[in-house]
Amino acid sequence: MPADEETKQPDTGSASSLTVVLAFAMNILVAVAKSVAAVITGSASMVAEAVHSWADAGNEVFLLVAERRGALGRDRAHPFGHGRETYIWSMFAAFGLFAVGAAVSVMHGITSLTAPEEEADYLVGYIVLAVSAVLEGISFMQSVRQANAGSRRLSIHPLRFISRTSDSTLRAVFFEDAAALVGLAIAAVGMALHQITGKPVYDAIGSILVGLLLGVIAIFLIRRNSEFLLGQRAMPETRSILLRRLLDHPDIDRVTYLHAEYVGPTQFYVVAAVDVRGDLRESDVAVLLRRIEAQLEDADAIVEAVLTLSTADEPSLVP
């Protein structure tokens, strides 16, 4: 794929919005089913799963706001646009997952360890878990498809892409859905052990394990969002693409410095030091650099480009 195509921003906004909307719809359906099953079965693991799904559904609202706010263009007060606002709202979603999903599940599991044993309708619980797995799987496959598309553009493994991507909403949905599927398996094992042994302690332990899983995912998402808010460099693969594009420019002879920083999902602020071809006058060089900057900014992914001149002794970068 030509470098100029790779640095153009794909239609990630609509894809991410579809992923979040689908996840929200599936989580609402799953949360209602789990809540009914939790009341019928009295299973601690099922209660934890219901809390998990309601927390996920609430988080999708934050992610939808993140998508809408992050898509706002540049204005006088925000010369780089509102892309970083995506990470603020995604941070709220990750904190909600930790405070509601993880903390409540762990606390409920701990209290269930000493609670008196109640009769449980296991069949209802298993049916709900199976239906939930199908619905969560539908949402998860949408995020997997989007992750695979992104990884192919950069020729990297999908898991590396999902952990490093600047698209915080895609990362949140992917890991939340993955955690939901693992949580369903934990809840099923906890219910099965409760049914086989007659001891509710296994069900309570299942609730605690679900809560710990959500806590790990939430901390990871909080950490990644904070890194992008502080200023995250572009992935090496993306930096190489940008460098090749500069070196392929007919008016650029060398590139001795390149910094590309995320200012939003798949949006970059680029600073580079270049050596232009020929022996132009200072005024002509200034005009040439401004023209190249404008050409770079024609790529949707580059919000702003700033070019300076290299010194003669600086070594050229290689892709």
Image (spheres, helix red, strand yellow):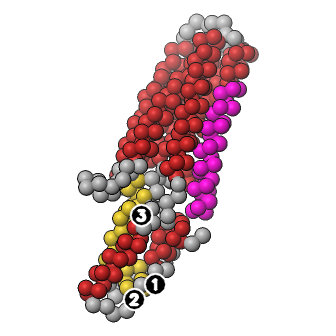
Mark 1 highlights which residue? 250
- In the rendered structure, does residue 154 fall within the stretch colored magenta? yes
Residue sitting nearer the eye, 259 or 114: 259
Magenta stretch, main secondary structure class? helix
Q: Residues within 10 Å of mark 2 (few under 14, many from 20)?
A: few
* Mark 3, secondary structure of its residue: strand
* Mark 1, secondary structure of its residue: loop
Visible residue check, residue 207 = no
x then y, percent, for residue 296 = 41, 71
The residue positioned 62% from the left and 46% from the top of the image is 144
Q: Amino acid at mark 1?
A: Pro
Quarter of the image for the N terminus: give it: bottom right
Asked if 9 appears above or below 17 in the picture, the reply is below
Mark 3 highlights which residue? 302
Nearest to N terminus: mark 3 or mark 1: 1
Residue sitting nearer the eye, 92 or 222: 92
Q: Amino acid at mark 3?
A: Ile
The residue positioned 42% from the left and 67% from the top of the image is 298
Query: Which labelled disc corresponds to residue 277?
Result: 2
Visible residue check, residue 183 = yes
Q: Disc 3 and disc 1: Cα gap in Å?
A: 19 Å
Nearest to N terminus: mark 1 or mark 2: 1
x then y, percent, for residue 9 = 49, 60
Instruction: Answer whether labels 3 and 1 touch (C-beta < 8 Å).
Output: no
Q: Disc 3 and disc 2: Cα gap in Å?
A: 23 Å
Instruction: Answer whether labels 1 and 2 touch (C-beta < 8 Å).
Output: yes
The residue positioned 56% from the left and 15% from the top of the image is 113
Q: Amino acid at mark 2?
A: Arg
In the image, the segment drawn in magenta is: 130-159
- In the rendered structure, does residue 151 fall within the stretch colored magenta? yes
Q: Quadrant of residue 67?
A: top left
Q: Disc 1 and disc 2: Cα gap in Å?
A: 8 Å
